[in-house]
Amino acid sequence: MTTILSAEELATIEAGYDPIASRSWSINARCYIDPKFQDIEREQIFHRSWQFLCHEEKLREDGSYIAADIEGQSIVATRDTTGKLRAFYNVCKHRGHELVKGEGKLNRITCPYHAWTYELNGSLKAARHSEKIENFNKSEICLDQVQIETFCHLVFINLDPNATPLAEQSGDLAKEVMSYAPDLGQLTFAHRLTYKINANWKSVVDNFLECYHCPVAHKDFVSLVEMDTYKVKTHGIYSSHMAKAGQTNNNAYSIDDAICTDHAVWFLWPNMTLMRYPGRGNFMVWRFYPAGPEETYEVFDFFFETAEPNEAEIEALKFIDDVLQPEDIGLVESVQRGMQTPAFRQGRYMVDSEESGLSEHAVHHFHGLVLDAYAKAVEEN
Ligand code: FES
Ligand SMILES: [Fe+2]
């Protein structure tokens, strides 16, 4: 079922938005509070974009599997016995029961309801008593496949069978990421932080896409990052946010032995940031999921050289959890309350032609992608 968005509703949301950021107004706050937009975004954005699943380490061995929820759809990814990576709806073809939970290794997938058994390539291997059933052709039954792709040693899923590969959609992103994090394939999952926030997911993304607020709201962070080197570039479905970082006398966390001295952040449409921070070899994948029209669930995964964070990494995690996140959550929840009043519908983007860390052109870029997705909903009416 497709949620209908009328051309008039779209016109309200995009009134004042201009392809040139310095002339443009932001998109209308209505799409941050009206529950209708959650359905439109699920269909047009989350079910048609590449969504992070896990580091490739979880699916390295033949027979490995991992189950996950991709915006309300249960999915299982496997490395089958021939070494091919696959993903399916985690749904049995008999009566629709969920097949597996969690992660691990398997020879076959057995449904916990009536024990139909599937090969890891999705084909039905056995269905109890089926030999007594007329016209029951096992070879015609297979789990429904979804797209899966390894990109920069990270595994992504796309529920849209017609989606073009992430590597193709994302231009030079892989080259950029691998030049900053050549060790990404050897890193291992070390920690996860999760948060529930009372704000629309787009408010949370908006806040991540600009550092105009950093000198005001993140006093310790701006002692770690050299703001005068900060550059923001937008490209297709991603933007990059780069700065030199790692003054040893900063107030955020100690980085005495750092091998990385950059703050390297990429926003990848629609809902994630890929990051490398000052410290040992490290990488982070942070995601922002709509938990409701005005609620966001954040999942931050940390990949380090060892599964056990070292002392400096524990300090960095503590800085994110105790300082940076409370600062940002306070900001976006306040913005959400403002959007609930009649006093705020749109604002201007503070941009500069140097594409500095104080410029908000990446927020404008993100809003353009949101409007493109809404326009598709209108087209499909
Ligand atoms: S629902 Fe899976 S075997 Fe019956
Ligand atoms: Fe912030």
Image (cartoon, rainbow, N blue to C red):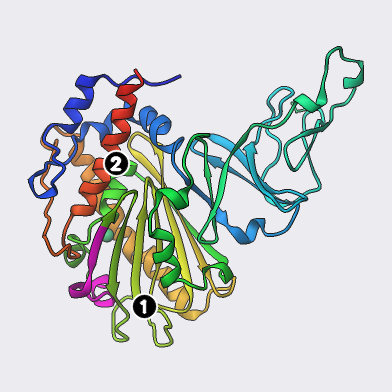
Q: Badge 1 is on which residue? A: 253
Q: Amino acid at mark 2?
A: Leu
User: What residue is rendered at 67% in x and 59% in y?
Assistant: 60
Q: Position of residue 126 (x, y in %)?
A: 85, 31
- Image marks 2 and 1: residues in contact by CB distance under 8 Å: no
Residue type beneath disc 1:
Tyr
Which residue position is annotated with label 2? 369
- Magenta residues span 220-233
Residue plotted at (23% across, 76% down): 226
Q: Quadrant of residue 175?
A: bottom left
Q: Residue furthest left?
A: 23
Does label 2 or label 1 sit earlier along the sequence? 1
* Drawn side of residue 274 relative to residue 188, left or right: left
Please, is residue 212 above or below residue 364 in the view?
Answer: below
Q: In the picture provided, is 102 more to the left or to the right than 165?
A: right
- Of 53 and 146, which appears nearest the observer? 146
Does the segment drawn in magenta span residue 225? yes
Few, some or many residues within 10 Å of mark 2 (<14, 14–19, 20+): some
Task: Tell me how far mark 2 sits from mark 1, CA to CA.
Answer: 35 Å
> For residue 295, what is the image quadrant?
top left
Return the x and y of residue 150 as percentages of the image width and height. 55, 54
Give neighbour class at mark 1: few <14, some 14-19, many 20+ (Cα, 10 Å). many
- Ligand 1's image quarter is top right
